[in-house]
Amino acid sequence: MHTSRQDYIFSYMVDYINTPDESVWGIEDKAIANLLEKTEIVGKWLNLCAGDGRFNNLILKKADGAVAVDIDENALQKLVRITPDILRKKLTTKTVNVVKLFPFEDDLFDGIFCVGTLHLFSESVFKSILLEMERVLKSGGRIIIDFATDIKRTYPNGNLWIIENEQNYSMEEALPFLKEIFKEYKVNIIADKVVPHKTRLKDREYVFTSNFVLIDAIKK
């Protein structure tokens, strides 16, 4: 993984154009999919760090419209590619570096969704991202995020893939931190485990396992 400390850019240099329709980041976790299915998703939503489109179609099916943003334009091109024609009219994409000021006006979105990314950042950077999320979210709007912990990537030979500079929180670190920064929200917190699954990323094949925290928060 390529990391830019200055801009907090995390990139695996994936050639999204030549990857299949399935996400390179693995399956859609059932806990997140179930939450999206049962949640009332209306109005305009922001899919933050949308990557190559996991869960994006679930959001589009229910929302009036969605803006999918990511720092990788190639990932967004794949996201558009896997979006059914009937849903594309509700989709907008934009290249955005999430650690900088969001290019959106205040109180614009009815909901914000972000999975598979926020655990990569330090607590201070996460807090600055959350401030921007709060700024563009309407009062009464909803934030749905996940936060991976205890990440492990195991090669077929049993060795671990350790990614240099990756922030890898434990569940014991993540839970109190998340409870504190969302204390002003009406929040539901779920702690769960990812089903171990085989993942192929360029020339690497490994089994991915982790715990995660799922946050469903309403802005007061």
Image (cartoon, helix red, strand yellow):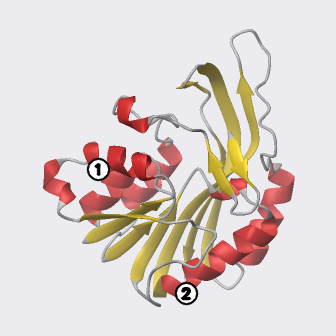
- Residue at the spot 78% in from the left edge and 75% down from the top edge: 180
Q: Is residue 33 shown left or right of residue 25?
A: left
Mark earlier in primary sequence (2, 1): 1
Q: Amino acid at mark 2?
A: Arg
Q: Which disc is residue 218 wearing?
A: none
Compared to 40, does 23 lie above or below?
A: above
Question: Where is residue 169 drawn, in percent x and y?
Answer: 81, 51
Q: Is residue 97 shown left or right of residue 179?
A: left
- Residue at the spot 44% in from the left edge and 88% down from the top edge: 105
Q: Is residue 200 shown left or right of residue 162?
A: left
Residue at the top extreme?
Answer: 157
Compared to 159, does 109 lie above or below?
A: below
C-alpha separation, residue under disc 2 versus residue under disc 1: 27 Å
Q: Quadrant of the C terminus?
A: bottom right
User: Which secondary structure, mark 1?
Assistant: helix
Q: In this orientation, does residue 54 appear?
A: no
Question: Where is residue 91 drawn, in percent x and y?
Answer: 27, 63
Question: Where is residue 139 drawn, in percent x and y?
Answer: 48, 90
Compared to 123, does 213 lie above or below?
A: above
- Residue at the spot 60% in from the left edge and 39% down from the top edge: 12
What crowding class fits label 1: few (fewer than 14 Cα within 10 Å), some (14-19), or many (20 or more)? many
Q: Which residue is mark 2?
A: 135
The answer to whether the residue labelled 2 contacts the one labelled 1, judged by CB atoms less than 8 Å apart, is no
* Front position among marks 2 and 1: 1
User: Which secondary structure, mark 2?
Assistant: helix
- Residue at the spot 55% in from the left edge and 87% down from the top edge: 135
Image quarter of residue 9: bottom right
Q: Quadrant of the N terminus?
A: top right
Q: Is residue 194 shown left or right of residue 138?
A: right
Q: Amino acid at mark 1?
A: Val
Q: Which disc is residue 80 wearing?
A: 1
Q: In this orientation, does residue 95 appear?
A: yes
